[in-house]
Amino acid sequence: MVTPQAVEGAALQLRGVGKTFVRADRSTVLALEGVSLDVAAGELVSLVGPSGCGKSTLLRLIAGLEPATTGELRVGSEPITCPSAERGLMFQDPSLFPWLTVRRNIESGLVARGVLRQRRHEVAEFLRLVGLEAFADVYPHQLSGGMAQRAALARALINHPRVLLLDEPLGALDQFTRMRMQDEILRVWESRGTTMVLVTHDIDEAIYVSDRIAIMTPRPGRIEQIIDVALKRPRRRTDARFLALRAEILERLNLSGDPANSSSPPALDNLSR
Ligand SMILES: Nc1ncnc2c1ncn2[C@@H]1O[C@H](COP(=O)(O)OP(=O)(O)OP(=O)(O)O)[C@@H](O)[C@H]1O
Ligand SMILES: [Mg+2]
């Protein structure tokens, strides 16, 4: 069994983070401006905001794949300057290696770090954690979408990331599989205490899984509001307080469908995507 650990996660601190991209024609795009956010060790925070507001950019900065133009990012007390296995990233597309079995795909994280020999025994533990023991020796094309996402989750987790960055990881799944995967992510989060930052366009998903929801403005992305989800887990999607919070967020985003709000442009233009 995977040994439950108190809190494997690390705190994240973002201070006045900005990102300007320079295009090939030398024009610039201000993608993020003045983003400050603290995520406690073991906390699960969702980022919600309109398409193009810089959510993926923010995750890439936290992952260390791009430098910030302004501001500071820290994991624990360390400044983020480059990618690290302690910050895992999972995308909407599970991007498994099609020529490797599920087991080999999960092992690939260990291979990349040159620790396969010492840590190979953990592969079976993570296969069990995501319920894929019976599928260890099959190839990605033989998996359903949900199974492929679970394999990708195990691959992201095998390096014991202290921070797991999830960029719409369930966006391509049907609603039923998506809800089951939300429970899967929560189970992993609870058993390992990994700090998680989840980008999602699904308000229900954000309420169901998050400790807090950060709502971002259209580009340049800033954090407009942070909402505490003070509902006990396991949460019920039909609970009156769940629905009240959902209504409050939709109102807040001018997406409630109330004609009184229809003159204002929606703050989030692609939530139904
Ligand atoms: N490498 C790049 N070069 C130039 N502009 C970029 C680059 N990467 C992102 N951008 C721009 O930065 C802005 C933010 O992009 P980003 O992908 O972070 O948005 P997003 O919030 O993740 O959107 P979506 O919800 O559609 O995934 C966009 O205007 C995008 O065109
Ligand atoms: Mg994105």
Image (spheres, helix red, strand yellow):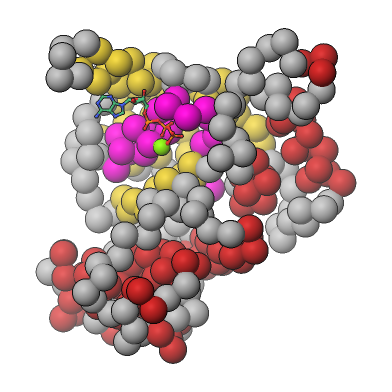
- Compared with residue 59, is residue 223 higher up or lower down, i.e. above or below? above
**Seen in the image, is 116 located left or right of residue 245?**
left
- Left or right side of 48 for 113: left
**Residue at 22%, 50% in the rendered image:** 84
Q: Residue at x 33, y 53 (%)?
A: 88
The picture places residue 239, in percent across and down from the top left corner, at: 84, 51
Query: Can you say whether 9 is above or below 126 in the image?
Result: above
* Image quadrant in which the C terminus is located: top right
Left or right of 182: which side holds 29? Answer: left
Answer left or right for 172 relative to 95. right
Q: Is residue 66 magenta?
A: no
Q: Residue at x 26, y 70 (%)?
A: 98
> What are the residue bounds of the magenta stretch?
40-63
Seen as rendered, the residue at the extreme left is: 114
The answer to which image quadrant residue 25 occupies is top left
- Please state which of residues 239 and 212 is positioned toward the viewer in this rendering: 239
Instruction: Indicate the position of residue 32 as horizontal and vertical percent values.
Output: 38, 21
Say which quarter of the image contains residue 12.
top left
